[in-house]
Amino acid sequence: MNTSELMEVALKAGEILLCSGAEIYRVEDTISRICKNYGVDCESFVLPTGIFISTGGGKCESVSLIKRIRERSVDLHRIERINEFSRGLQKKTMSYEEAMKTLEDIQNTRQYNFITRLVAAGITAFVFTMLFKGNVKEASAALLISTLIYLINEKISGIGLFRIFELFVSGVIIGALSLLTVRIIPDLSIYKIIIGSVMILVPGVTITNGMRDALHGDINSSMLRLGEAVFVAAAVGGGVGFMLSIGLLWV
Amino acid sequence: MREMLLAFIGSLCAGILFNVKSKNLIWTGLSGALGWVSYILMNRATGGVIVATFIGAVAVGLFSESAARIVKSPATVFSIPGIFPLVPGIGAYTTVQYIFENRLSDAARTAVETIASAAAIAFGIMIVYAVFRILTRPGEKSKKRY
């Protein structure tokens, strides 16, 4: 494998990690570890929105690559497999084709089918409404709303609109459906239904990851993630709040 | 006990949404249940949210690092779904909702609480990570292989 091919492999591994919601230090660590396994010294600079890697100087040829990252979600299985991949390289180096094939394979893993995820989203809402001291009726309402939201989100993201707008629309739908529910069954608390329903959308993990990046010294990324979390919360909360401020007049 | 079960199911479902492989799902559920129980006990004992969250995160961190060594997966696989019941997503949402309702001082209070609990979780996980790194420092031999 020559240097530019190696850099491509390292970049691809980094890209998969970053898209799967890994911490910045893990991405940088993996990239430099892969390169070191082939005896190449490389410098990487990773932000949540992009990866820059570069090598050169001395006797080796100089290569720089940039990759823009647009979508980030959390996929722990991919992180685990990339981890295995980079450890495997430490024991036994692979050829370019082999490595790229493994990475493609990792990128295409989709472990749970849509129905399972849908049910999981619903149950998450149910459980968290109960944890926040809601009763079974409220939790069931949250379960239905959350399942529907997950379904809608999956459909909208297929169209390819910007994500903040999707979240806003989801918020509006949650607000509308919760209003409808309390109108049909008046003795339920609308706030408890909403809390359970928004659980799968709110940026709790993003805020915490932002803080973790800060503790690792990646201040840039931490600020970006916290900023992202603020926008996500504003979009979801804005959607719900917008609907409630109109709807509560009507109810 | 009931809450423990709920937190268990909650983390397990979060594990499914975060695509943890099925063999590890049971561990993520346990991780979440343990974190939540520590949080609740500490919360009842002291009445404080932030310290309780920190203790919950430390519990999740300890569990994840140990589980990571037992089943040979990165600790993140267990800690991210494990902290899912603790993370202040609802706090972030409530802040925006208060702003909409024009209750600005309530909004400021929840905003600070949100940031503080996120920091508490991150700090709790990191402390455990650091301690485990110091205890199980890789020997000279494996260092040279890089």
Image (cartoon, coloured by chain):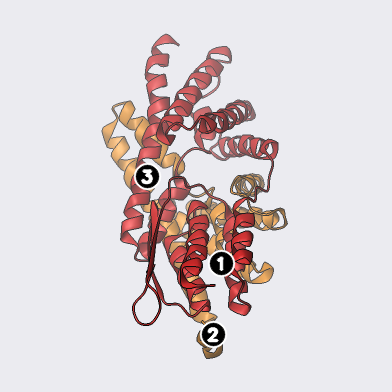
Q: Which residue does the numbered mark 2 point to in the structure image?
A: B145
Q: Chain of mark 3?
A: A
Q: Amino acid under label 3?
A: Glu
- A54 displayed left or right of B81: left
Q: Do pointers 3 and 1 mark residues of a single chain? A: no
Q: Are marks 3 and 2 on the same chain?
A: no
Spot occupied by residue A152 in the image (x, y as percentages of width and height): 56, 28
Residue A97 visible, this angle: yes
Residue, disc 1: B62
Indicate the amino acid at tag 2: Arg
| Disc 3 from disc 2: Cα separation | 38 Å
Q: In the picture shown, does residue A42 fall above or below A164?
A: below
Residue shown at 28% from the left, 27% from the top = B102
The front one of A117 and B134 is A117
Circle 1 SS class? helix
- Dot 2 falls on a residue whose secondary structure is helix
Q: Depth check: A114 or B83 in front?
A: A114
Chain (red): A
Q: For the point 37% across and 72% down, which residue is it?
A: A62
Hey, which quadrant is residue A56 in on the image? bottom left
Q: Which mark is residue A228?
A: 3
- C-alpha gap between disc 3 and disc 1: 29 Å
Q: Are marks 3 and 1 in contact (CB under 8 Å)?
A: no
**Numbered marks: total:** 3
Q: Is residue B63 visible?
A: no
